[in-house]
Image (spheres, rainbow, N blue to C red):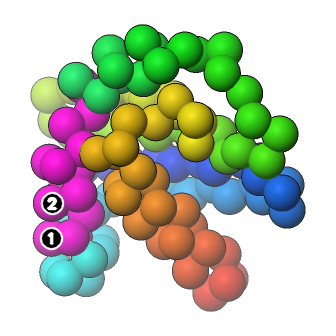
Amino acid sequence: MHIKFSCIGGFANLDLKFQIDTDELPEEQNEELQNLMKTADLPNAVTESKMAGAKAKGADSFSYQLDIANEKNKQSFSFTDITAPEEVRPLLDYLRNLAIEMKMAE
């Protein structure tokens, strides 16, 4: 599975972006990511996020873009700290921390 992730905004005005094929991750990280994605239930979370109000804004909130592609399809998801459903937040936190880790390794 190929993941493209971006996180922008926040108090520090972060601009984090990365792409990865999950097969390139160490086995533990890949398993944790797969579990977080299963728990997040992204297709259903999108409906909940839209219901929370796509125009909801916070001065210091992060905006997230997540594109996921596999052999069968490609899906894109957009959230903010305000609109992200509770079950999606651990996934976004994990991906943000992974993006920071990758940026620091550059």
Give the percent coordinates (x, y) of residue 23. 22, 66
**On the image, numbered disc 1 is attached to which residue?**
31
Give the percent coordinates (x, y) of residue 43. 24, 25
Q: Which mark is residue 2?
A: none
In the figure, 11 relative to 42: above or below? below
Please identify the quarter of the rendering in which residue 72 is found. top left
- Confirm whether residue 106 shows in the render: yes
Q: CA distance from mark 1 to mark 2?
A: 6 Å
Image marks 1 and 2: residues in contact by CB distance under 8 Å: yes
Q: Residue at x 52, y 30 (%)?
A: 83
* Amino acid type indicated by mark 1: Glu
Secondary structure beneath dot 1 equals: helix
Please identify the quarter of the rendering in which residue 36 is found. bottom left
**On the image, numbered disc 2 is attached to which residue?**
35
Numbered-mark total: 2
Does residue 89 show up magenta in the picture?
no
Left or right of 19, for residue 26: left
- Confirm whether residue 20 shows in the render: no
Segment colored magenta: 30-43
* Amino acid type indicated by mark 2: Asn
